[in-house]
Amino acid sequence: MPRRDDTSDSGYGLAYEIRILLAKANLLLEGLWRRGRLFFCVVGLFIGLSLLGIWSYTSNWLHILALVLFVAAALYTLYYAIRRFERPTRARALRYLEQRNQLRHRPLQSLGATSEAEKINNTSSNLMWRVYQKTLRRSLVGLKVGGPRLDMGAGDNYGFRAIVILLLVAAFIVAGPRSVERLSAAVTPRIGSPVVPTNVTAWITPPAYTAQAPILLSQSEGGDAEIKTYVVPTQSSFIAHVFGSEGEVPVLIIGDERQQFSASDARNFQIETSFEQPADVKIEKDGEVIAQWQLNIIPDEVPTVTLLDEPKVTERSAFNLQYQALDDYGVENIGGEITRDAAEGKINLALPTPGRGSKRVVGKSYHELTSHPWAGLPVILTLFVEDQLGQRGYSEALNFVMPERIFTHPVAKALIEQRKQLVTEPEESRMDVALVLHTLADLPESFNNDMTVQLSLSTARAMLVNGESQKSIDEVVDILWDTALHLENGDLSMAEAALRKAQEALMEALNSDASDEEIKRLVEELRIAMENFLQALAQQAQPMENQATGDPNSQDQLIESQDLQKLLDRIDQFARGGARDAARQLLSELQNIMENLKAAEARPPSAGQQEAQEMLNELGQLMQKQQDLLDQTFRKSQGRQPQQGNQRGQNGQQQQNGQQPGQQGQQGQQGQQGQSGQRGNLQDLAEVQEAIRQMLGELMGRIGENGEIPEALGRAERSMNDARGALEQGQGQSALQSEGQALESLRQGTEALAQQMMENGQGQGTQSAGPGQPGQGRDPLGRPLDDEGSQGRNAGDAMMRGEADSFNKSRSIRDEVQRRLSDSARSMLERDYLKRLLDIF
């Protein structure tokens, strides 16, 4: 059968012609790849090496030689590919489609053929041919072309093509925006001139105190390229590296200043410098600008400090400063200066800097300057703050009168007067002061024959008479101050100084990030200093107890010693746990408490307080009596129950042995007689229970006259009445339950009464004082003193003691019940009773 030539498309529709065209395209791509694989690999290898910048590390002649070899290889492989390339024809395209769709007997070629019937115009044969082609068209519906089959790995036994592809991907990533530049440099070697460095790395390192990360500078070349601008802190460091350079040494240009790079080796250079002013920064090589940036400077602002409140004088004659410091990067140090208008010199104050390095610092400090000659005089206070750059800012000057210690002891007052004369007129008053000291030393009864004072006066007088220098006068000034403090406060002054020193040492350690071991040691030193101070303050308070008076209705609360100990423990825990800011805050609170303590003032108890204490004591006695009754009832009930059990066991045994009913009746009569005896014993306890109930009723009447009767006491009275009835009827188990309920109700009533008295202001006990103002027989923190004046262990007032006693009695009963219950040697009956009794508590 004759067929049409390759160029004829008679017999095909538009859809088939499109598929044939796509098949030709696939054949073209497959042919190009199959014949040009080697050419593509050569070109890809050259592009990958060029993007990696390999030619910048080679000499000029080697670069040219490599370029020639790559061009020759590319031309040869291209010629080889073109020579073996086959043009896709229509017949190949039809065959390609038949193979892709797995069509047998070449139906596509038959579809385009012309029959002999058409040539001779045979109508019947021609009709059959058209039916045949129509059938072919229906069978070829959904003909697929697919994509080209490149077969990447065919003939590549060593994976060379995969290596080239990976090289290209990595090279494009490394080159980034410099891809075009590197490709251009690869095909245009610079003959006869050195290679211009293309790898410049530069960054800015801000000062450490700014806590800012280094800033990497993107390369901006000279010429028409856009110059990038960076904003950096002042005194930042500029660091640059130039890699792979030959020829002249690169030069850094900052404004009008030129600095040469230092050579790391023959081809690598680096430089580091700092700047404080905005500048146009350039890197120049062989007369050409290879990198350029504009650097703007953020100035470091001067720190500021302000007083948050006026200085406040404490009970210990110190003054308190509250301040706030601000800086744009961080506060390094805070201090203060005290000056006088007409006087030389100044007083330097070291202020704590909590959270050193923070942008905002709020602090509090205490300063005791009563020993200074300016005490009691108008002075000028100025605070200052420093940042980590060394800049200093000042607060507004504040005029205030520096606190002065008031002395009440006659000799102490005289010594302070003489001290002031030595300070103001040292040479003129030297001999006059020596005469006064001699006179005071001859009157030992005026200072209770204290040998310490006697020796101090004699020493000071001798130094004034025999010494001629200002140093001797200064030493006498110090001796007179210490002696006056000793006369006024005894050992309290030294304890107070030691306490302040321990507080300042701990605060300084918290501010300087000391080790945990150092913090623990300083906390223990502060604990000891605080105890010594409280002991000295308590001893000072004892002579005042019989003279002081106070408001008996004061509701101020006592500061418990346990609270201060817990506060110290929390400071230690926070500091060693890393929460230094919280530890500093707690230490400031402790300083505030200790600075405002003062000597105790004894206050006589009021009539209402005495009556309240008596009622609480009577309730405690009733609880003890009820507990004793409960124990007696249990013992007598325990003695009866085993006898009944034995009696029943004996009766059963006798019946089994065939004993006569008469004998059983006789034994039963004996058991009834024993039971009657036990009932009589329980009736005796009923009288005791009734007596306790009547005492409770009388006490409730007295409570009702002064206030509301707690409901728990009413429940206790009803339970006692039930217990009395059960005891009269000989019902031991019922009596035990009612007695236990009565005991528990008594405990609850005692607690309720104590709470009620505290709210009404009647349970304050025999002492009432504010912070640092305990009552008679107590130290400044409310701890009771023994006969020798030492601090006791129990804290709190009388009401709290009454409540604690009631609670402790109830708890001791519960502990005793638990102890007996854990004894395995006890009978089951007793253990059951103890379990029920324990449920009550």
Image (cartoon, rainbow, N blue to C red):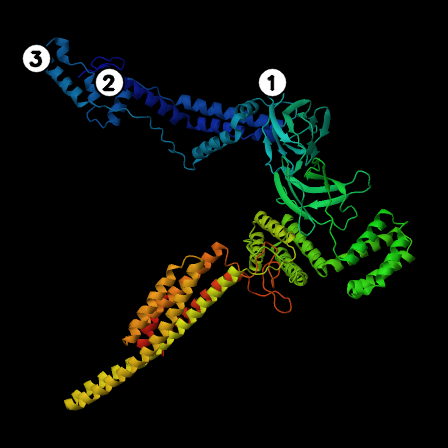
Disc ID at residue 16: 2
Q: Amino acid at mark 3?
A: Ser
Q: Residue at x 15, y 9 (%)?
A: 119
Q: Quadrant of residue 665?
A: bottom left
Q: Which residue is mark 1?
A: 224
Q: Nearer the viewer, mark 2 or mark 3?
A: 2
Q: Position of residue 596 (x, y in %)?
A: 64, 52
Q: Amino acid at mark 2?
A: Tyr
Q: Quadrant of the N terminus?
A: top left
Could you give the CA–CA distance between mark 3 and mark 1, rounded to whole angstroms?
A: 84 Å
Q: Position of residue 516 (x, y in %)?
A: 60, 55
Q: Nearer the viewer, mark 2 or mark 1?
A: 1
Q: Residues within 10 Å of mark 1 (few under 14, many from 20)?
A: few
Q: Amino acid at mark 1?
A: Asp
Label 1: which secondary element: loop
Of pointers 2 and 3, the one earlier in the residue sequence: 2
Q: Quadrant of residue 414?
A: bottom right
769 sits to left or right of 662: right
Can the viewer see residue 752 in this picture? no
The reply to whether discs 2 and 1 touch (Cβ–Cβ < 8 Å) is no
Q: Residue at x 42, y 69 (%)?
A: 623
Above or below, 818 relative to 415:
below
Q: Residue at x 56, y 29 (%)?
A: 53
> Which residue occupies the foreground of this view, 667 or 544?
544
Of pointers 2 and 1, the one earlier in the residue sequence: 2
Can the viewer see residue 772 in this picture? yes
Q: Nearer the viewer, mark 3 or mark 1?
A: 1
Q: Which residue is mark 3?
A: 124
Label 3: which secondary element: helix
Of pointers 3 and 1, the one earlier in the residue sequence: 3
Above or below, 180 relative to 711:
above
Could you give the CA–CA distance between mark 2 and mark 3, rounded to whole angstroms?
A: 28 Å
